[in-house]
Image (tube, rainbow, N blue to C red):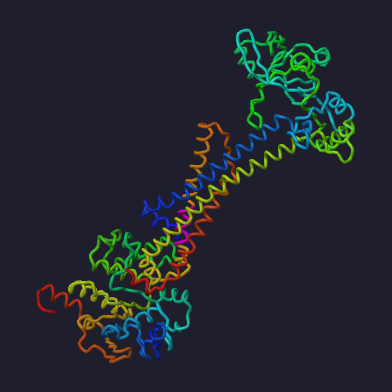
Amino acid sequence: MNPLIALKIAARALTRNTMRSALTMLGIIIGVGAVIAMVAVGQGAKVQVEAQIASIGSNMLMVFPGSTTQGGVHTGSGSATTLTEEDSKAIAKELSAVHLAAPVLRTSAQVISANQNWSTVVSGSTADYFSIRDWPIESGSGFTQSDVDGATKVAVIGKTVTSNLFGTQDPVGQIIRIRNVPFKVIGVLAPKGQSAQGQDQDDVIIIPLSTLQKRIMGVTNIMAILVSANSPEETTAAQEQIKLLLRQRHHLTASQEDDFSVRNMADIAAAAESSSRIMTLLLGSIASVSLIVGGIGIMNIMLVSVTERTREIGIRMAVGARGRDILLQFLMEAVVLSLSGGLIGIALGIGGSKLISSVVHWPTIVSIDSVLLASAFSIGIGVFFGLYPARRAASLDPIEALRYD
Amino acid sequence: MAPLILVEDLWKIYRTGEIELAALKGISFSVNRGEFVALMGPSGSGKSTLMHLLGCLDRPTRGRYLLDGIDVGGLKPNELAGIRNQKIGFVFQGFNLLSRTTALENTELPMMYDEIPAAERAARAREALARVGLAERSYHYPNQLSGGQQQRVAIARALVMRPPLILADEPTGNLDTRTSVEIMALFQELNEGGMTLILVTHEPDIAQFASRVIRFRDGTIQSDLAVAQRADARRTLAALAAGEPA
């Protein structure tokens, strides 16, 4: 039989029982809609994470101090004070794969402006910090090496701090007090948004490292060294070079563990990407379960339909329908059900993603791939779950079928 | 000319577990083109089984059955479907029309399985409906038609493929006397036009409209006789209209 005629017969049989067809389709609609929406959420999260990592800089490395051991008990990574400003200078000067290096020390502090106060993170670093982080100054200027050498009391502040301390006022040239030490605001950082961990990167004040060490914290150590490799491709080489140099500088023998750790942003990016991929996969597979349930619904209804229409099958066989004509007719019905359910589901999934975006402000991305996959999948479900009922219809004995009532 | 139907030593044995039941025990007969044969016999005599075999709905256990020169005994189910489509028009007791489907579409049904283009399907279906006097009712659904009209649609469906043979299984079983005679008049008319008809009935009155009656008993042919005084359905109708006993 001509598939077009089979399609016509199928469409007719389905419109004859609109309510039942709609309810049967609902399973597929929900399944496909859920898959599309969930994958869109996952994709959106993935792209967001990628963008955040790009905002940190993909050729960046971070060196942290190792853990201290006290009586055999390891304390957490970063608890030791083994890194020094000289390590940072040596990394910048001696290593071929390294472009820049900047020591970082961080503390939290209460900050006061003329009539506001705010608790924030105060980072001390050198002038290269801004170029390593690829972080432009929006207004005013950054500090220079002479500020670091002279431990001057100047501060560059982030967008969040600016709005909390100064509102819409221009902060450049104003005085703020960090732990009661007066600082002159010389610049405002361009906004960077949330980090991959969900922290507000703009809630920060950056001052010269020496100023933070001497005037606020009264320490000489640093917490980390930020390093930028010459290019993203050279990050691995830079990592190796840093390890060798620091082991040498810290006089570690071959049997001793590293008293520092080097983290490569590319690795962090890969880890974040794989976790968002797992999330997409997980969401997608949970949604697929409902798709399979929808398929079983189709099979169920098709079996009922075959039984109800046994006599019709008998009549068709008597006037010359072959087994494969009957098979095609019922298979077509199942596919029409699942495909139209799938198409409605796709529309609903896209609508749902847009709704999620606008209501909870999650970025969602509906990819063409997931739409094509969902369409193919719903046809597949129709064929898979329609085949058994259709075969059952096709294998009916015409005499028995004609007698059935 | 070779007979349209040639049956030689035809057996049908049903097996249910250990028990074997012979429904037909070596039947032989032939039907020439243009004959109007009535098959009679009590239930269980094997006439329904024979009807299914003649209609290619079932295959014989043993024996030969030639339909229009084709040995259909050894054909596969799909080939049998093709024979049913091309060679046989069925008329059933319960009409067996598709519900919620117009008379026209019901009549088109066999052509759907023969790749006939839509325009030709519609034209031929209209022609067949006109032939049975239902041209005006093309777009009626079965539940909007009387029993006699439904049976006429079924006959139109049987005619539409222009088969050499019409098999009618108790076609008047669900109809009142007058409508039954009307249907028989239509059959006689078709027969006069050269159509070969085989009719299963248990009503002797109906069998009298045929030209030959084969009686069955216990799976064998009991008698095979030409009808001595064949009734003319049109005259019977006229008599019914005049209020005289038929």
Q: Position of residue A339 (x, y in %)?
A: 49, 52
> Residue A105 falls in which quadrant of the image?
top right
| Res. B6 in view | no
**Could you say where residue A134 lies in the image, as x and y percent from the top left?**
74, 25
Question: Was residue A332 drawn as part of the magenta stretch in this picture?
Answer: yes
* Main secondary structure along the magenta-highlighted residues: helix
Q: Quadrant of the C terminus of chain A?
A: bottom left
Q: Give the side of residue A67 with respect to residue B57, left or right.
A: right
Q: Quadrant of residue B223?
A: bottom left
Looking at the image, is B235 positioned above or below residue B131? below
Residue at 65 percent across and 19 percent down: it is A120
Give the image location of residue B166, x and y in percent: 34, 77
Q: Is residue A354 above or below residue A216?
A: below
Q: Which residues are magenta?
A: A330-338
B112 lies left or right of A137? left
Who's the residue at 32% across and 59% down the image? B100
